[in-house]
Amino acid sequence: GVGKTTIAKAVYNTIVHKFEFHCFLAKVRKESEQHGGLVNLQNIILSKILGGKELKVINVDEGINLLWERLRYKRILLVLDDVNESDQLDALAGAPDWFGCGSRIIITTRDKRLLTVHEVNPIYNARKLDHHEGCELFRLNAFKKKGNHDDDEKLWINTIVRYAHGLPLAL
């Protein structure tokens, strides 16, 4: 992809020290497809935020109630990575009043509609790099320098950047 997870990890790692309570949930789509997946994800959030205190969520509705009860006064940082269904957001970060003042919830998804329906604000659209940006990124990573390259290197760089289709992680 265009690096949504990488961006979310970088933001998380940059600001996590500002929060007493934090949780990065990777691969929400994949994990929620497993048997009991949403319940397991709810248990992970509660365990990480509450410092391993043993709370066992039995079903999604109970998890929703527990998340609201236990987190509504806590200032937390929560990342939900690769969300693809509305029920995942409903079960894991239902509404702003689930979390204390100053909390930050970061959601990565391929489906902007999910964010719009849940009134997520603001929305950052990760995008592919244009050809010039791709060349710059590749030069910095491959040659560890900016600057002039001979014609063979330029041809090689242009070919690789076109092949990567603007995807930063491919470069």
Image (cartoon, rainbow, N blue to C red):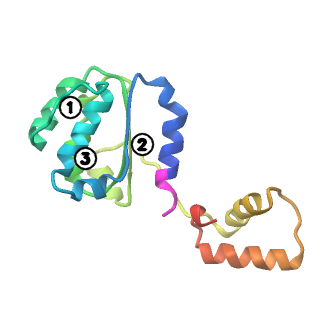
Q: Is residue 142 magenta?
A: no
In the picture shown, does residue 160 fall above or below 64?
below
In the picture shown, does residue 84 fall above or below 77?
below
- Residue 17 at what x, y percent from top left? 50, 26
Give the distance between the C-alpha atoms of the residues marked 3 and 2, in whole angstroms: 16 Å
Element at badge 3? helix
Q: Is residue 93 left or right of residue 109?
A: left
Decide which of tag 1 and tag 2 comes sooner along the chain: 1
Q: Is residue 3 magenta?
A: yes
Q: Amino acid at mark 3?
A: Leu
Q: Is residue 65 left or right of residue 94?
A: left
Q: Residues within 10 Å of mark 2 (few under 14, many from 20)?
A: few
- Residue 163 at what x, y percent from top left? 62, 77
Where does the magenta region start and end?
A: 1-5
In the picture shown, does residue 123 fall above or below 139?
above
| Tag 3 residue | 89
| Tag 2 residue | 122
Question: Mark 1 or mark 3: which is in front?
Answer: 1
32, 103: nearer the viewer: 32
Residue depicted at 27% across the width and 31% down the height: 47
Residue depicted at 60% across the width and 72% down the height: 164
Residue 67's tag is 1
